[in-house]
Amino acid sequence: MTVQQTCEYLKGQDDFLILCHQSPDGDTLGSGFALYYTLRALGKRARVACSDPIPSQFDFLLPQEMPDFTPRCVVAVDIADTQLLGSGLSRWENQVDLCIDHHPSNKLYAKQTLLRGSAAATAEIMIEIICGLGVQPDSQIADCIYTGLCTDTGCFQYSNVTSYTLRTAADMIDRGADAYRINRRMFSTKSKARIAMEREVLDSLVYAMDGKIAVIAVTGEMLARTGAEESELDGLSSIPREIEGVQVGVTLREKADGFKVSLRTVEKIDASHICAVFGGGGHARAAGCFISGSLEQCRRKIIQATKAACEEAGL
């Protein structure tokens, strides 16, 4: 669907359930609540749902309360695959009417999809929908959109940033987004447990291919020792790629029967192609997948696949 078609569709619907992905980040929440406030401004009923608790750092996005009703239109935002809904929202996996997303790996599971893989964040698409619906973004909506933009671009550091991304962020500031407060919350405020976790993951650091590949791990034992919550782990996946000479940064996060893998790469390596080997996907510079097995088994498998990609790229 185009933005215009999406706007026409939304105008004709009501009683919206807006789905955010599990382990919610700033883009899924910012996009979801921006759409929520927009639909409310149009006099429509809406609510936002997520399988996991919303981290406290995003509490400024939340309304005081949301209405309860039987949904008639289900919208997924920033969700490339129904597996990302999580167990709490899995009952909706075959009932998504509209998906708004920026992941090229989107499985096209919804009845209708607005997909722009070149967008830096789903929030970049959402603001076009909001304006297309005839709603002038207030400071609350601007905060939502700015949050989505800054978190999915690493505070505008990643290669997905374009001049349009920056102009959109500037427009949100002009409309009242509190950029200083949001940036500080997202990037400059860490709990003591988060600092302890960073020390733990650095102790787990393993290099491969003469330092071109760096792998860190987050295990259940680490979480127990530090007292860190899942919501405090966001951003850890950027640590390996920040090391000089590293071409591929890998973060392994322990789950029930294996490890969730997050890849961050430089220009010559396509992270989504590596993750596709294990049934995952994402963007060229940031992607994810899941590998079953022990830490050693998962680390060996992802290093092997990453080495092959590096060699193919001539690194």
Image (spheres, rainbow, N blue to C red):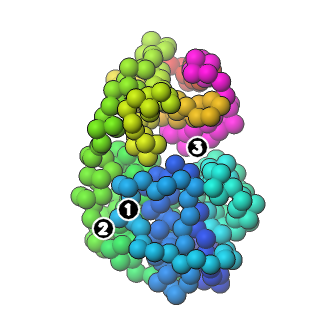
Give coordinates of residue 287: x percent, y percent: 55, 39
- Residue wearing tag 2: 177
Circle 3 or circle 1, nearest the eye: 1
- For the residue marked with disc 1, what is the amino acid? Asp
Displayed quadrant of residue 98: bottom right
Q: Locate residue 242, reporting x and y percent.
A: 36, 30
What residue type is disc 3 on?
Answer: Gly
Q: Which of disc 2 and disc 1 is earlier in sequence?
A: 1
Describe the element under mark 2 as helix, strand or loop: loop
Asked whether, in this view, residue 245 is left or right of residue 249, the answer is left
Q: Nearer the viewer, residue 16 or 213?
A: 16
Using the image, tell me which numbered label, if any, was put on residue 59.
1
**Residue furthest to the top:** 210
Q: Earlier in the sequence, mark 3 or mark 1?
A: 1
Q: Answer few, some or many: residues within 10 Å of disc 1's Cα (few below 14, many 20 plus, some between 14 and 19).
A: few
Disc on res. 282: 3
Q: Position of residue 90 (x, y in %)?
A: 69, 55
Query: Picture quarter containing residue 172?
Result: bottom left
The region drawn magenta spans 271-300
